[in-house]
Amino acid sequence: MNDAAFSPEQQEYLKGFMAGVEARRGALRPAGDGGGGGGGGGGPPDALRAAQDATIARGGKLVAQEEAKREKHPLDRWSELTARAAEGKFPKPIDDFIGRYHGLFFVGPAQNAFMCRLRIPGGILAAHQLDAIADIAAECAGGYADVTTRANLQFREIPADKGPVVVMRLGDIGLLPRGTGADNIRNLTASPTAGIDAQELMDTRPIIRALHHHILHTRDLFALPRKFNISVSGGGAVEVLQETNDIALSAVTTAAGLRFRLTLGGITGHRDFARPTGVVVAEADIIPVCDAILRVFIAEGDRTDRAKARLKYVLDRMSMDAFLGLVEQRLGRPLERIAEADIIAPPPPAKHGHVGVHAQKQPGLTYIGVMGAVGRLTVAQLRGVADIARRFGSGTIRLTVWQNLLISDVPEARVAPALDAIAALGLTHQASSIRGGLVACTGNAGCKFAASNTKRHAAELSAFLEAHLAFAEPVNIHLTGCHHSCAQHYVADIGLLAAKVERGEDLVEGYDLHLGGGAGPEQKIGRLIRPKVAHDELGPVVLGVLRGWLDQRAPGESFHAFCAARDDAALIALAGETTP
């Protein structure tokens, strides 16, 4: 190791890490080894125990979650879940944390029930899987499923005795929800139009499939200090929001051929997009590079402070070059670097391109972007979508990060009857410029952290706005219930973060209003313009902002560009309030 590459603080950190490794009388397994050794009998320690030992060797105190993982690996505690289910009991907090490794979340007091988050790599489902999901929702949950902002589905209102049953039934259809919560790699997101998009540079489906199985079958990768998001964009027409992920891989063209630009540390709830690295990755290298990054994060992530345990804070603590140096040590070879000037990015995605009827690159075929009620689909709608995908397409359903779905491979001659069938389900392919970019997290109807009923307020807000104005340009409105920002309010044109608002001696539900956020070519963190707007005053406030844009903008000026060109005072005036 070249000590000159690291600061004195980083050198001390690495010395502590190696001391912890020595304390376990072993060495860290090489990057490609996916075994699950426990460190007993003189064998090598697993990555989790080695990282915890290094923390202790430096004098750090493990948080309670790390102590629970240290006592017994969460993947080895399935029998505890089934035993509680047999007694009809929900878990205590630390046991709930362990259960999230298996996909089960106890969401009390918001609901005295489990939530189960699925794992659907790249968001692509077969019709028979969606049929089975509908059956599980009907027989074991609340009779619906929610599309999430990671192109995924989740069940709610699962009774205590049904939790393990849901997990097993999902495993039966190839959707085992292992690692969908707690300190794990979450559902992999990718271009929802992969393989059918005339604009894309690369079909990402084989990459996502291989990376998904690498994660599921590599025990050491269930040793993270906090959650981790990975996204792969093939350069298609539908936005993936990849720059909001810890690892973001975006297809680009270079003189050496197609590559994926690597950016790291995105976590927009903490106001950070993924950062440039100067590194590009060939398709064949994606799994080893991701594996090496994850193993450096396992070793370097903070296990003493949950608030500082994400990859962003590792990068804050050390330089990007130092972090990449450790990745290269894990890989055993240099990363490929290409100057930004030598990279050709694909055309930008189409804002609201996830809605409507679009031609595929396969002649004569189309895909249809379908919207529901802020991501919620009833059992009847789940079954109906599966049936439409079979009757009119190839039986393929594709979920997007915009809480909607696509039905692909529909012949042009069959589009009209397919649209009729979609409308008969109470769904639509014709969302307005307001509703097309409307995103809402679960809210306090199902999440203990949320301060407002985001889904209900989103529906009320969109109905109010649509009744008072219409315009052609797409605008994204995101409502999120708490600081975790599951609905990513900071990257919305209009971002709404739930807050409690004083009204006399009472507290009512409301939102902090942020304006001017964006992703992709519009990448920007939204600005807080007006705090604490009561939910029943939200419609007129947002209407005033939108009318101000339509009245004052230059010809063709988008809402995003309008906000970027104005200072806070001008936007505050539109929102009708004093400086926050």
Image: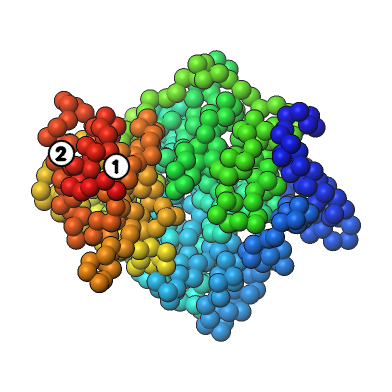
The image's colouring method is rainbow
Identify the residue shown where x is 38% and y is 39%: 525
Identify the residue shown where x is 58% and y is 79%: 84
**To which residue does mark 1 refer?**
515
Which amino acid type is marked by label 2? Gly
> Mark 2, residues whose alpha carbon is within 10 Å: few (<14), some, or many (≥20)?
some
Q: Nearer the viewer, residue 558 or 172?
A: 558
Q: Nearer the viewer, residue 95 or 134?
A: 95
Task: Determine whether the residue tagged by mark 2 lies in a helix, strand or loop.
Answer: helix
Pinpoint residue 132: horizontal percent, then vertical percent. Answer: 44, 63
Q: Nearer the viewer, residue 294 or 140?
A: 294
Pinpoint residue 511: horizontal percent, then vertical percent. Answer: 29, 56
**To which residue does mark 2 refer?**
548
Q: Earlier in the sequence, mark 1 or mark 2?
A: 1
Q: Is residue 8 left or right of residue 439?
A: right
Q: Judge whether 112 appears above or below 229 on screen.
A: below
Q: Give the total number of marks visible in the rendering.
A: 2
The residue lying furthest to the bottom in this view is 87
Which amino acid type is marked by label 1? Leu
Q: Is residue 269 left or right of residue 580?
A: right
Pinpoint residue 268: horizontal percent, then vertical percent. Answer: 44, 44
- Quarter of the figure with residue 199: top left
- Determine the CA span between mark 1 and mark 2: 13 Å
The residue lying furthest to the front in this view is 579
Q: Judge whether 68 appears above or below 519 on screen.
A: below
- Quarter of the figure with residue 330: top right
